[in-house]
């Protein structure tokens, strides 16, 4: 028997779910939190931090580098408060040395009294560090390019200069009682010996975190794992990671970094940032809730995710992608008949993430040629109509026929179900879908004639369906015994 479904308006739109316009042709069904366990879950590793990571949220730093971004102070405060309500561990801001407005914005956000620690991202220079420590931030994220590309074509400094300057800045920041992270830029195109040498040096003087950055998005998960694992054997401090998404590996790279011993992951809302951006907050949550649901739910208010994404999407004037992790229009929608049947019986069959955890609804598409009779039965239940299984199947066949000749909506499907039910109860021949155009009526007539011309196909379909149902019933009886 299908589980009960949520009450929804007649048009199938669900309030407070994926978008204000609902899902035309879909109907929301109940979302019940479930805990999923993968049989291929990796054996626990004492170095892994998959169950004890922290988020450094960089929408107000990396996100400001997004092509469409322009955040005034009011927008920054809204974003900072939303991220704080979500529960991120750190909020990273644009360097106060970037402009006078950036400095005053940084000071204003520091005065909000948020639970999250406030960081600012600065160049590895005493001038930037001196400006930053006076703003009231909790810590500084110091960065300098270490690849040959950036040393030659960006700042023009050699590794000796980089190391000496890093040690000087770290000592100064520590003397002011601030947290300090030192990160190489373009880490994955930097010489490994250079990296390990400078990381070892800054670790010895007491840096809180070292950072690795895939600045151009060239790294693969295996490369990330190897570098972080190696670095974990060199330093005792925390390890922060920053992954760009140019080649589509940002989320996978962040996860592999945690497996290898990293402790902190940089994210931004919707992944906005320079070029294609960095690890998206929502996508990272999708990956981590599958890895350790209890940890994610204990730390983060993930039901706030959609509100944050809608806020940022509006501010940067973009639409949330249809296939966006968790909050996209299609994230929890099911259309194929075999999927719909299984989802209605047990959502875990085709969902590894429960939409209820994020305050979302799942949707089942009833208005298409690939719908199944179990989905139509579920929709009829929503409409308060009861029929036999044979009648549900016949009604489904009528819906499929209509969907073959035109794009039908959920309202069309509801009309067919209601009129079919009326005809069965009152023994009438009311049109299933009134107001068809002359061309549509002619096409429907042609479909009917084609079906009637091959009765053996209809008989074969019925036999196959009956055999499948008989096998399912036998399996159910066997399990119950």
Image (cartoon, grey):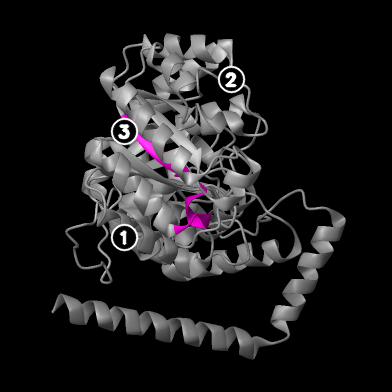
Mark nearer the viewer, 3 or 1: 1
**Of helix, strand and loop, which one carries label 2?**
loop
Label 2 belongs to which residue? 71
- Given residues 51 and 302, the one toward you in this image is 51
Is 467 rendered above or below residue 360? below
Q: Residues within 10 Å of mark 1 (few under 14, many from 20)?
A: some
The x and y percentages for residue 37 are 25, 63
Mark 2 vs mark 1: which is more N-terminal? 2
Mark 3 vs mark 1: which is more N-terminal? 1
The x and y percentages for residue 103 are 50, 13
Magenta segment: does it hold 189?
yes
Please indicate whether residue 146 sits to the left or right of residue 230 in the image.
right
Is 371 rendered above or below residue 76? below
Residue 395 is drawn in which quadrant?
bottom right
The x and y percentages for residue 467 are 41, 86
Q: Residue at x 62, y 62 (%)?
A: 399
Is 36 rendered above or below residue 298? below
Q: Residues within 10 Å of mark 2 (few under 14, many from 20)?
A: some
| Span colored in magenta | 180-191
Q: CA distance from mark 2 to mark 3?
A: 24 Å
**Of helix, strand and loop, which one carries label 1?**
helix
Q: Residue at x 69, y 87 (%)?
A: 454
Q: Residue at x 57, y 52 (%)?
A: 148
Label 3 belongs to which residue? 301
- Given residues 465 and 425, the one toward you in this image is 465
Mark nearer the viewer, 2 or 1: 1
In the picture, the quarter occupied by the C terminus is bottom left
Please indicate whether residue 479 sits to the left or right of residue 405 in the image.
left
Mark nearer the viewer, 2 or 3: 2
- Given residues 225 and 450, the one toward you in this image is 225
Q: Which mark is residue 230?
A: 1
């Amino acid at each position: 028997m299908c589980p009960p479904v949520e009450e929804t308006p007649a048009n199938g739109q669900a309030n407070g779910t994926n978008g204000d316009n609902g899902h035309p042709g879909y109907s929301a069904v109940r979302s019940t939190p479930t805990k999923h366990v993968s049989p291929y879950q990796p054996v626990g590793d004492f170095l892994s931090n998959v169950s004890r990571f922290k988020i450094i949220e960089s929408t107000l730093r990396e996100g400001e580098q997004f092509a469409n971004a322009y955040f005034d102070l009011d927008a920054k405060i809204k974003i900072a408060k939303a991220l704080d309500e979500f529960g991120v561990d750190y909020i990273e801001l644009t360097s106060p040395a970037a402009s006078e407005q950036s400095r005053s914005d940084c000071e204003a956000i520091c005065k909000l009294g948020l639970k999250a620690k406030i960081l600012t991202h600065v160049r590895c220079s005493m001038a930037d560090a001196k400006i930053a420590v006076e703003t009231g931030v909790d810590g500084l994220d110091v960065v300098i390019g270490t690849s040959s590309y950036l040393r030659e074509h960006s700042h023009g400094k050699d590794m000796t200069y980089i190391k000496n300057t890093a040690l000087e800045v770290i000592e100064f920041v520590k003397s002011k009682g601030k947290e300090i992270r030192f990160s190489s830029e373009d880490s994955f195109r930097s010489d490994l010996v250079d990296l390990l040498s400078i990381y070892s040096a800054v670790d010895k003087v007491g840096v809180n975190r070292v950072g690795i950055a895939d600045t151009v998005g060239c790294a693969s998960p295996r490369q990330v794992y190897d570098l972080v694992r190696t670095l974990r054997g060199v330093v005792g401090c925390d390890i922060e990671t920053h992954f760009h998404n140019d080649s589509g590996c940002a989320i996978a790279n962040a996860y592999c970094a945690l497996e290898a011993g990293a402790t902190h992951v940089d994210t931004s809302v919707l992944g906005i940032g320079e070029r294609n951006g960095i690890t998206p907050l929502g996508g990272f949550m999708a990956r981590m809730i599958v890895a350790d649901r209890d940890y994610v739910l204990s730390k983060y208010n993930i039901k706030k995710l959609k509100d944050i994404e809608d806020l940022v999407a509006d501010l940067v004037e973009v639409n949330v992608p249809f296939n966006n992790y968790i909050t996209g229009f299609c994230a929890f929608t099911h259309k194929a008949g075999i999927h719909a049947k299984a989802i209605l019986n047990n959502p875990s069959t085709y969902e590894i993430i429960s939409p209820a955890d994020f305050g979302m609804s799942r949707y089942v598409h009833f208005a298409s040629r690939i719908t199944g009779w179990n989905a139509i039965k579920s929709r009829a239940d929503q409409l308060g109509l009861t029929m036999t299984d044979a009648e549900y199947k016949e009604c489904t066949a009528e819906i499929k026929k209509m969907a073959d000749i035109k794009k039908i909506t959920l309202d069309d499907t509801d009309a067919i179900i209601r009129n079919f039910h009326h005809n069965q109860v009152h023994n009438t021949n009311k049109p299933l879908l009134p107001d068809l155009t002359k061309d549509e009526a002619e096409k429907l007539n042609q479909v009917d004639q084609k079906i009637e011309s091959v009765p053996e196909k209809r008989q074969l379909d019925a036999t196959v369906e009956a055999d499948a149902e008989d096998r399912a019933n036998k399996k159910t009886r066997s399990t119950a015994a």
